[in-house]
Image (tube, rainbow, N blue to C red):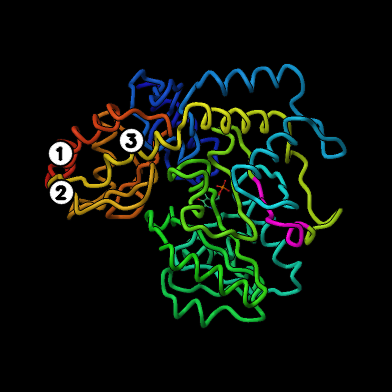
Amino acid sequence: MTAGSDLLGRYAGSMVQVFGTPQLVLASGDGCWVTDVDGKRYLDLLSGIAVNALGHGHPALVQAVTKQAESAIHVSNFFTSEPAIALAERILAVADAPEGSGVFFANSGTEATEAAIKLSRRTGRTRIIALEGSFHGRSTGALALTHKAAYREPFEPLIPEVVFVPPGDAEALTAAVDDATAAVFLEPVQGEAGVRELSVDYLRLARELTSVHGALLVVDEIQTGIGRTGDWFAHQASGIVPDAMTLAKGLGGGVPIGALVTFGPDVTALLTTGQHGTTFGGNPLACAAGLAVLDTIERDHLLEHVRRVAALLDDVRIEGVAGTRGRGLLRAIELDGIPSAAVMVAARDAGFIVNAVTPTALRLAPPLVISEEQLQGFLDALPSILEAARAAGEAAP
Ligand SMILES: Cc1ncc(COP(=O)(O)O)c(C=O)c1O
């Protein structure tokens, strides 16, 4: 028995089984590599689902967290700390947020969504427009805005008055948004739906409609933000200024943190003293991690790096690949007739971690620091991975 299979046996006997059986038991990481408990190394092309923005064990992040842990890990919301204030200021700066904007720190993406839902209720309205294919989180408020029936239906009834419209359908959005709409929630690139980008025109239409009808435009940048698409935030490529933005994942580089950003004084003023809170939100440890991530992205010019490296994925001409989509280092590889689950397994066997985001597509969301050589190494290995997946499919009964 390997150390991995022994630990997975213990996992099965000790955990609530919401994730099924994990693929691997990972022991450590170093840069863009992770190692499992049996000593096998993998190139990490998923980075904890768009979380480990700086890869694993990045010195700037390790030093920031270590130093902060030595002074103060938690102070409660009766107090505050310099890392929290400094991180809020930095987020507002890179978001080009106008004067009077604000940040509420939470601990995860779903909590950021909850805060945004509560913000939207403060408009005095309750109807929310979300997109088909959307994923905004698993807590019951966020779940109501998450489209996949299998996630939602076991927990219904959820909050009412959520209307789903097909992404990219200008007519449907125009018909849905009216003077009773509290907010439109959207992901500029729908991650869990299979990395599907919304067009610039559609984002601009969403901005215009929400402005005309006095509704909030909430952009969920939980997966797309913090440099993932080659901009600080994906919506910036369209030039729109949202009313609110949710963040998590890459913000802490692996340390749990979420945030709601409110744009401008009127939106910021919607949530007043006592109307929202969380024990751990804004703790100095997570905020020091966030500062290290933002500092490193800026210092090492990682936005430019992401755009340069990601160009390798613009045009993948490999037999068995139908095409790629997405932006920056949030990409899908659409497969031609080979189930993505089989390719994911074959990739793992070959030493690469990827994600079968839909039955026909792989998702790549590697650390922002991945090198061209590392990414090219995967592309070079892809034909034999696809071949192995095909052969495994033919061998299966
Ligand atoms: C776009 C988006 N929104 C919200 C969430 C929920 O974040 P969390 O899992 O941290 O609650 C996710 C997580 O995958 C996400 O991709």
Residue drawn at (36%, 51%), measured in percent from left and top?
326
- Count residues near mark 3 (Cα–Cα under 10 Å), then give few for <14, some for 14-19, many for 20+: many
Q: In this view, does 83 lie above or below 281?
A: above
Q: Which residue is drawn at 64% across and 57% down?
A: 244
Is residue 224 shown left or right of residue 177? Answer: left
Q: What residue type is labelled 3?
A: Val
Q: What stretch is highlighted in magenta?
A: 259-268
Judging by the rendered image, the residue that carries numbered circle 3 is 309
Residue 232 horizontal/vertical position (percent): 52, 43
The numbered mark at residue 249 is none
Which residue, given by chain and number where applicable, does mark 1 sit on?
Answer: 383
Residue at figure coordinates x 23%, y 37% from the top left: 346
Label 2 packing within 10 angstroms: few (<14), some (14-19), many (20+): some
Q: What is the secondary structure assignment of the residue under circle 1? A: helix
**Residue position marked by numbered label 2 in the rendering:** 320
**Regarding mark 2 in the picture, which secondary structure is present there?**
loop
N-term-proximal mark, 1 vs 2: 2
Q: Which is closer to the viewer, label 2 or label 3? A: 3
Quick one: label 3 or label 1, which is nearer the N terminus? 3
The verdict on residue 262 being magenta is yes
